[in-house]
Image: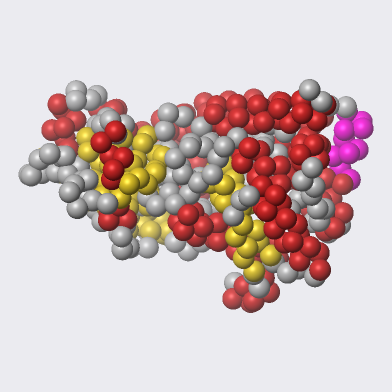
Amino acid sequence: MTVDETLIKDFEAVCRRHIETAGLLHRNAPVVVALSGGADSVALLAVLSRLGYDCRAAHCNFHLRGEESMRDMRHCRQVCETLDIDLYVRDFDVEEYRRTHPGNSVEMACRELRYKWFEDLLDRESAQAVAVGHHSDDRVETFFLNLMRGAGITGLTSMNARSGNVIRPLLPFTRTETEAYVTALGLGFISDSSNASDAHRRNRLRNKVLPVLEELFPGASDSVLRSISHLEAARTIYNEAIEEKRRRYISGHEIAIRELAETEIEAPTVLFEMLRHLNFTYTQVCDMLECASSSGAVFRSTDGMTVAEISHGRLELVDAGRHKLGPKECHTVNPKHDIAEPIHINISRHHVADFSSEKFSASSAFFDAAALDGDARWELRHYRRGDRIVPFGAHKSKLVSDIFASARLSASQKRETWLLTRNDQIVWILGLRNSAHFAVGPQTRTYIRMQLAEN
């Protein structure tokens, strides 16, 4: 076996283990692969294709670098022709977008345009995820950038293998390793001339700071990656502690802010973590605690979506006409592709002829594909008093609490069980019972299979 063959085999083995260990992909739906033409994205597309995943390449042309932008697009077409992979190209007018979205930098505008299109492709292709080419060097850079912003444990560990429907299969590799893999395959890659410019913070860090750090402290990047791993372990413990505080101080749509302020030594940190997902700042949180014993103080989140009002020692949260609280309260989800948060559900579409071979289990649900028609609102939430479901095989509804009792669930298990709803109608008690709504029947031609992921 040649050196190149060994390199290719080892690279693909490591990538396969990472994907399987992190539960990033399954074989029942395609994956959208972000392709820029650089070494990282070409390596990503090649390795996923060679590992047998059904790939759809997506290239964004922002037309910001003249002929270079066109060169990148042509190279992406060539790579996809070589790998026999469908390529989707989208042209964007970044300046027009910035005119209609004032305050956005060019970099932020490109990111927003890119990921909005990726979301559209997820629906169009019924894909399970968007794969991006971030690697371990990117992770080190992100760590330092967030460190210099004064980020906490969440920010310092922000580049994970999965972020919602975005996955990062190349995190085990360095930039040098991805370049070597692409070269060994004979695919070639292009270099973005803007990467040499120090106009952006990340480029200054990459081109000036990190090389000096590595020279003065050999192995510095590896040490940072180990530190990130340690922080991730600490973050798990930290999040568990915050969740315990959440259960103690949150009731319905309110937080017992006066009790929290009087009891918790690190009250600002606890409250900030409870409100982080609603876009309240740390300064606002400190001001809330100052007013914890009074009434009438009102705070608005930085995105304008949530209002927090303090009354008689309690903090009530209202969001766009709908009460909204912690991240476990209610999540809008899109069942046209894999659901990644708040729980991972693999979704695949099948012809009804395959249905006879399916095995029913509480960890899976089956729906006539017609359930996805129209603009139905799908949500994942927890149990509410009075919830009812029409169980599969039944004609009348039954109290969810009775189903919980029959399953002998503990109080904590009841609180943690997820319910999937369609237009506020419960269609699946995850891990427990399927609904009769949109059941696979004689008129079904295509059905949807939802499967709780093991990882």
Residue 296 in the image: x percent, y percent? 37, 59
Q: Residue at x 29, y 33 (%)?
A: 357
**Number of dots carrying numbers:** 0
The residue depicted at 36 percent of the width and 36 percent of the height is 451
Using residue 82 as the reference point, say whether residue 66 is left or right of it.
right
Residue 56: percent from left, percent from top: 57, 51
Where are the magenta residues, as a range?
A: 208-217
Residue lying at the far left in this picture: please name it: 396
- Tell me, yes or no, if residue 55 can be seen here: yes
Residue positioned 67% across, 31% down in the render: 12
Q: Where does the N terminus fall, quadrant-wise?
A: top right
- Display coloring: secondary structure
Where residue 287 sits: x, y (%)? Answer: 51, 51
Q: Is residue 414 magenta?
A: no
Q: Nearer the viewer, residue 283 or 427?
A: 427
Which of the two residues, 294 or 181, is positioned nearer the viewer here?
181
